[in-house]
Image (spheres, grey):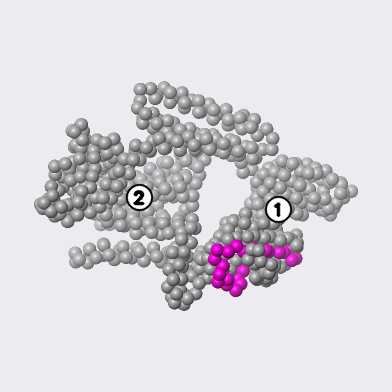
C-alpha cells in the first residue's frame, strides 16, 4: 500500500501532468496551424510596399515585398487579407521570383470571393529546395478591384508568412537533415510570443506539483507560489486565461489537502480580493479590477465546496484561518529578516561536500550522510542573540538538524546557496536599480501624456496639456519632493533610496489617475476637426473629413450628411474621403458614425449642387 502511494505520488501523477502538458501543446500547434513538419518566417506590414492609403486594392494597384529566406523548401506564401464582410468580384495575380532575376518563378491568379475576413490566405507553389539564404521578391496585383468590390490588406501581425515544408520520409532517411530540422523547429516555435506563453502556462500544473514535492514540507512556500501567480495574472496578463486559472487553483488545492485548510481560509482570501476590487475600479483600472473580482469569485466557490465537505465529513485537526494568516506573517517575516541578514553580511552561507573523515561528516544523521553536500549557515561574531535564535527557528521550522555552526542538510543545498546569494545581490543593488527604473518610468509617462495631447489636438496642444493636467502634475511632483526632503534627514543612503522609490510609486499612480480622469473626456472620442471643402456646388466632388478615432480599415463606418449615408472613397483612422452625389447629398449636419456605433461631433456642411 505504501509502495503504491509512493509510486502514485512520485511517478504516476508527474507522468500524467507531463502527458497533459505535451497533449495540450500538440493541440495548440494544430489549432494555430503551426505545423509539425514546417518552418515559418513571418513579416510585418512594413515589408509590403505600395499598399494604398485606403488599404483596399483597386484595379491596377500593385503591392510588392522583398524578404530574406532562412530555410530551404519554401513552398507557401501567406498574406493577411480581409474581404470586409462581403463577397468581392476582384481577381488577384500573385508573382514570385528570386531578387535580381528577370524571370518570375511562379505566377497565378486567384478569385477574391474565396478570401475570408482578416485571415491569412495561403498561396502554394512548387517548393524551392535551395531557398535558404536567398532574397525573394513578390508582387500582388489587382485586376478588377473597384469601390465596394475590393479586398484589403490588414495591419495585423503577422501580415506575411513564408512556409517551408519537409517530408517525414526525407527527415527519417537523412539524419543530417533531421538534426538540422529539430533545433530549427524548436527555435522557430519559441520565437513566437504566443507559443512561449502557452508553453509556459500549460507546464504550470507540472511545475507546481514538482515544487510541492520539493518544498511541500510546510505550506508557506506553496502558498507563496500561488500568491505570486495571482499577482502576475492580475497585473501583467491582460486577458483571462482559463487554463492558468485551473493551474493556480490546482496549486492551491495541494497545500489545502495536505495541511487540511479549513474553508474560512479560502473565504478570507476571497473577501480580501473583493475588498480590493472597488479600489482599482474607482481608479479607472477596469481590467485589473475585473481580475480581482474573478479570483474573488473562484476562491469563494472553493470555500463553498470545502464547507459542504466539512459539513458532510466533519474532519478534525483543520488549520483555522487565524492560525494560517498568523503563521504566514511570522514565517514570511522571518524569511525577509533572514535574507536581509544574509545581504548585509551578518550571516554567511557556504556549500561544502561531505567527506570521509571530514569535520562535516556526521554519521549520526542518515540524511546528512546521504545528501552529498551540506549548507553551512554561520552567524557573524557581532550577530545579536535574537539573530542566532532566528537561525535556529528557521531550521527548526524546516525540520532540519542543527549542529555547531548550523549545518542545514539537503539534496538541494547548492540551489539554496545560489538563491541566497542572488537575493543578497538583489537586496544590495535592487533599491538603486528600482529607483533608476521608476525615474525613467515617470519621465516616459509624462512625455506619453504630453504626446497624447499633441497627437489628438490640432492646435494649442501644449497649452491644453498645461491647463488640464500639467499644473496638477507639477504640483504633485513638487509636493512629493518637499516630503522627501523633510523625511530623508539623517537617514542612510539605502533608506533614502527606498523612500524616494516609495514616493515615486505614489506619484506614478496618482499621475496616472489624474490623466485617466482628464483624458477620458477625449482620448478615444470620435472627433471631426475639419472638413474640406466645407461648402460646394459641384457634384461628384471628393470631400475630406479630418479627425481622430475613426478606426482603420476594414472597420469602416458611415459618413452622414443630414442623416443620409454618403459614398465612401477612402477611410482611415484620421481621414475620410466621401464623394458628393446630387441624388443623395444635401446641406445639413455632417457626422461620422464608426462601426461600433460611436458618433462624432457634428459640423455644418453646405451642398448646393442639387438646386
Classed neighbour count for the residue bearing mark 2: other residues with Cα under 10 Å, few (<14), some (14–19), many (≥20): some
Which residue is at a point 27% across and 56% down the rendered structure image? 213
Which residue is at a point 53% across and 68% down the rendered structure image? 72
Assign a secondary structure to mark 2: helix
Q: Is residue 383 above or below residue 152?
A: above
Q: Quadrant of residue 568 in the image? A: bottom right
Front position in the image: 438 or 317: 438
Where residue 195 appears, x then y in whole percent? 47, 59
Q: Which quadrant of the rendered structure holds the N terminus?
A: bottom left
Q: Give the range drawn in magenta.
A: 120-145
Q: Residue 53 carries which label?
A: 1
Q: In this view, does 551 lie above or below 79?
A: above
Distance CA(mark 1)–CA(mark 2):
49 Å
Q: Determine whether label 1 and label 2 are within 8 Å by CB.
A: no
Where residue 183 appears, x then y in whole percent? 44, 64
Residue 268 shown left or right of residue 31 in the figure: left
Residue 527 seen in the current view: yes
Amino acid at each position: 500500500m505504501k509502495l503504491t502511494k509512493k509510486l502514485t505520488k512520485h511517478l504516476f501523477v508527474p507522468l500524467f501532468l507531463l502527458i497533459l502538458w505535451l497533449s495540450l501543446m500538440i493541440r495548440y500547434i494544430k489549432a494555430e496551424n503551426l505545423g509539425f513538419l514546417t518552418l515559418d518566417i513571418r513579416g510585418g506590414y512594413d515589408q509590403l510596399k505600395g499598399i494604398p492609403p485606403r488599404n483596399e486594392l483597386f484595379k491596377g494597384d500593385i503591392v510588392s515585398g522583398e524578404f530574406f529566406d532562412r530555410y530551404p523548401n519554401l513552398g507557401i506564401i501567406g498574406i493577411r487579407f480581409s474581404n470586409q464582410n462581403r463577397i468581392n468580384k476582384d481577381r488577384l495575380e500573385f508573382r514570385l521570383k528570386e531578387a535580381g532575376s528577370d524571370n518570375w518563378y511562379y505566377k497565378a491568379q486567384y478569385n477574391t470571393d474565396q478570401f475570408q475576413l482578416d485571415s491569412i490566405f495561403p498561396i502554394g507553389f512548387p517548393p524551392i529546395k535551395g531557398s535558404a539564404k536567398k532574397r525573394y521578391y513578390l508582387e500582388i496585383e489587382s485586376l478588377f478591384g473597384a469601390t465596394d468590390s475590393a479586398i484589403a490588406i490588414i495591419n495585423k501581425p503577422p501580415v506575411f508568412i513564408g512556409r517551408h515544408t519537409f517530408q517525414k520520409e526525407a527527415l527519417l532517411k537523412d539524419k543530417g537533415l533531421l538534426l538540422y530540422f529539430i533545433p530549427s523547429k524548436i527555435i522557430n516555435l519559441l520565437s513566437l510570443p504566443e507559443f512561449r506563453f502557452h508553453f509556459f502556462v500549460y507546464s504550470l500544473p507540472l511545475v507546481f506539483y514538482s515544487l510541492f514535492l520539493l518544498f511541500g514540507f510546510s505550506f508557506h512556500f506553496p502558498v507563496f507560489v500561488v500568491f505570486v501567480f495571482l499577482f502576475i495574472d492580475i497585473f501583467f496578463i491582460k486577458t483571462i486565461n482559463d487554463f492558468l486559472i485551473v493551474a493556480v487553483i490546482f496549486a492551491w488545492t495541494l497545500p489545502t489537502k495536505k495541511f487540511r485548510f479549513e474553508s474560512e481560509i479560502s473565504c478570507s482570501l476571497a473577501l480580501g480580493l473583493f475588498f480590493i476590487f472597488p479600489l482599482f475600479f474607482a481608479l479607472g483600472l477596469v481590467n485589473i479590477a475585473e481580475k480581482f473580482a474573478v479570483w474573488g469569485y473562484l476562491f469563494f466557490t472553493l470555500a463553498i465546496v470545502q464547507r459542504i465537505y466539512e459539513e458532510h465529513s466533519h474532519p478534525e485537526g483543520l488549520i483555522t484561518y487565524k492560525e494560517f494568516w498568523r503563521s504566514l506573517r511570522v514565517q514570511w517575516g522571518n524569511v525577509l529578516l533572514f535574507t536581509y541578514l544574509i545581504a548585509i553580511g551578518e550571516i554567511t552561507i557556504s556549500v561544502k561536500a561531505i567527506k570521509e573523515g571530514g569535520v562535516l561528516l556526521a554519521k549520526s544523521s542518515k540524511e546528512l550522510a546521504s545528501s552529498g553536500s551540506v549548507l553551512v549557515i554561520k552567524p557573524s561574531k557581532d550577530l545579536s542573540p535574537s539573530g542566532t535564535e532566528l537561525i535556529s527557528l528557521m531550521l527548526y521550522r524546516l525540520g532540519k538538524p542543527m549542529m555547531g555552526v548550523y549545518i542545514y542538510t539537503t539534496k538541494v543545498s547548492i540551489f539554496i546557496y545560489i538563491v541566497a546569494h542572488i537575493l543578497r545581490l538583489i537586496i544590495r543593488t535592487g533599491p538603486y536599480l528600482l529607483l533608476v527604473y521608476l525615474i525613467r518610468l515617470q519621465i516616459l509617462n509624462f512625455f506619453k501624456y504630453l504626446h497624447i495631447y499633441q497627437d489628438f489636438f490640432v492646435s494649442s496642444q501644449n497649452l491644453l496639456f498645461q491647463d488640464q493636467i500639467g499644473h496638477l502634475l507639477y504640483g504633485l511632483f513638487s509636493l512629493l519632493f518637499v516630503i522627501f526632503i523633510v523625511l530623508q534627514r539623517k537617514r542612510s543612503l539605502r533608506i533614502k533610496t527606498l523612500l524616494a522609490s516609495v514616493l515615486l510609486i505614489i506619484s506614478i499612480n496618482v499621475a496616472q489617475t489624474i490623466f485617466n480622469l482628464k483624458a477620458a473626456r477625449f482620448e478615444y472620442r470620435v472627433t471631426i476637426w475639419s472638413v474640406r471643402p466645407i461648402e460646394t456646388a459641384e457634384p461628384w466632388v471628393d470631400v475630406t473629413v479630418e479627425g481622430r478615432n475613426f478606426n482603420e480599415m476594414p472597420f469602416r463606418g458611415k459618413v452622414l450628411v443630414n442623416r443620409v449615408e454618403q459614398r465612401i472613397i477612402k477611410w482611415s483612422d484620421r481621414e475620410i474621403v466621401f464623394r458628393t452625389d446630387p441624388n443623395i447629398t444635401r446641406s445639413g449636419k455632417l457626422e461620422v458614425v464608426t462601426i461600433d456605433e460611436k458618433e462624432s461631433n457634428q459640423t455644418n456642411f453646405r451642398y448646393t449642387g442639387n438646386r
